[in-house]
Amino acid sequence: MEKMSPESEQNYSLEESDLFMNAQELDYASRKGKGVKNHSRWRKVRKQLRSNLLLIATLTGVLLGVGFGFAARRLNLTQEQIVYLSFPGELFMRALKMIVLPLIASSIIVGLAGMDAKLSGKLGLRAIMYYMTTTILAIAMGLIMAVTIQPGGSTHVNDTIATEGDHHQPTNAADSFFDLLRNMFPDNIIEATFKQYKTDRVVVLHAEANLTDDNSTTIQSVKLVGNYNDGTNILGIITFCAIFGIFLGKVGRPGKTVVKFFVGFNEVIMRMVNFIMWCSPVGITFLIAGKIAEVEDLEDIMTKLGLYVATVLTATLLHGFVVLPTIYFVTTRKSPFKFIAGMSQSLLTAWATASSSATLPITFKCMEEKNKVDKRVTRFMLPVGATVNMDGGAVYEGVSALFIAQMQGYPITFGTMLTISATATASSVGAAGVPHGVLVTIMVVLQACGLPVTDIPLLLAVDWLLDRFRTMVNVFGDAVGAGVVAHLSRKELEASDNAEEELGSGVMESKSTIAKSEEQIIVIDSISVV
């Protein structure tokens, strides 16, 4: 074996050293790379947590509210103590309702003032087609589930519950429709902010004396009396603001100052909404706790009406989270799961407050910031949808009407189904977007079918729970409608944007041309002076 020279030994040791150092460096680099990857992974997790912090806090508030509510039931709190318990939730609801009116007014005016009449007409037509389609599908879903499950066939209730509804005034479908049109065009827009018109049927008795004997006969007649009841006439305000916004857009240059005012006003309102949203976890906790604590005989009610509750919930959730996502996917070819995730904050708030009108400010934020839907579409469709699109209410009306018919042994024919469908479709439009608002419209459906309205208090016993789920579906239906219409109108919206850009560039070119011509005039004047 040849002996290495001292030079080669030194070179060999240097190469070995280099290899050893390279291995160390590689190990350090790999560990550093893993550290960088872990750091970037944690940074992504922190970013996700930060962006969904409000959603996590709201969900925690819902769970805490349910827990506190059932714990409060064990303490047998008095009515006064329950009011104190739900007081923070009451303040939260008041704050949401306070912001609804200025939000609707500024959103609709700003949205329609920035559109041409042709674009707003197409948006309106597509919105109406969507609302009618989903309402009919919702009623059909409710009828199919009620016929399949037969919730009224096994329900037996005592007479004390069913006789509480004798004080309800009779309601007519034609009166409700005409009141809808009257409220669309209020005679006083200021009064519409706190009053809405309603026609009542008053029974008048006339006594007529007989000439032949001393006896008198009593003649009964019905008189229509119009009254203004407490409550914001949202439909009238939407109509006025829509007309105002369309004509403001047609005015042109003189109306720019007014448009700027409403744009700034809308920006301030949205910042207020953002502040109220961060208060929602606390408000929702006490709102739910107080509602669960005040329900009497919860176990007994759920035992008697459990099948009815299961039918309504099944039909509502199937329509909300199967039918509507399918419509969204078929129309837009986008993932409905991502859309639902973007709406989660709004859906939780809708479930907690049971009011689509009160949830409207948060729906705006979710649609525009999370789901990136065009503001011109959301500002037009969401306020209108909160008033005229009630998918959850339509499902509820279909199931409830058949439930009462089955319970009373009323024969259910195809004609009965058509009557329920037509009346529920008409009455669900313009139903109040407030808690238990659909109970007013269910009276119209029952009377159209010849069913007794005395069973409505029976529905009221579980409506505190069902109202939350149908409000959630109402809000989600409005959001899906805005997403679908925005997708179908994307070409018109892009054309409107391009027209505005060309107009802006033309104005800039004309200004630069005028400036150049003024400079030339100044130069010519200076030469002539010289």
Image (cartoon, rainbow, N blue to C red):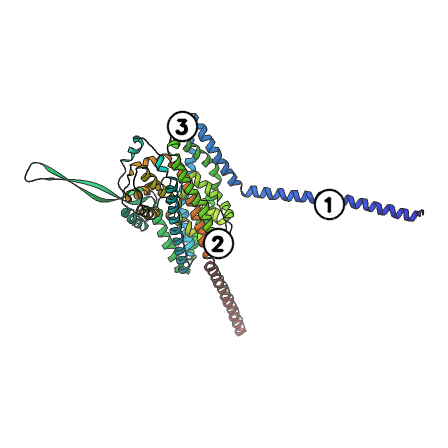
Nearer-the-camera pick, 260 or 396: 396
Q: Residue at x 41, y 58 (%)?
A: 122
Q: Position of residue 227 (x, y in %)?
A: 26, 43
Nearer-the-camera pick, 286 or 213: 213
Of the residues shown, which amino acid type is indicated by label 1?
Answer: Ala
Per the image, the residue denoted by label 3 is 81
Question: Mark 1, residues whose alpha carbon is within 10 Å: few (<14), some, or many (≥20)?
Answer: few
Q: Position of residue 18 (x, y in %)?
A: 82, 46
The answer to whether marks 3 and 1 mark residues whose Cβ atoms lie closer than 8 Å is: no
Sequence-wise first label, 3 or 1: 1
Q: Residue at x 39, y 55 (%)?
A: 124
Camera-side mark, 3 or 1: 1
Nearer-the-camera pick, 402 or 54: 402
Q: Position of residue 417 (x, y in %)?
A: 33, 46
Nearer-the-camera pick, 110 or 1: 1
CA distance for labels 3 and 1: 64 Å
Per the image, the residue denoted by label 1 is 29
CA distance for labels 2 and 3: 50 Å
State whether residue 525 is above or below residue 214. below
Q: Is residue 485 visible?
A: yes
Per the image, the residue denoted by label 2 is 332
Sequence-wise first label, 2 or 3: 3
Sequence-wise first label, 1 or 2: 1
Question: Mark 3, residues whose alpha carbon is within 10 Å: few (<14), some, or many (≥20)?
Answer: some
Query: Is label 3 in a helix, a strand or a loop?
Result: helix
Of the residues shown, which amino acid type is indicated by label 3?
Answer: Gln
Camera-side mark, 2 or 3: 2
Of the residues shown, which amino acid type is indicated by label 2?
Answer: Thr
Q: Residue at the left extreme?
A: 212
Camera-side mark, 1 or 2: 2
Q: Position of residue 445 (x, y in %)?
A: 31, 44
Query: Is label 1 in a helix, a strand or a loop?
Result: helix
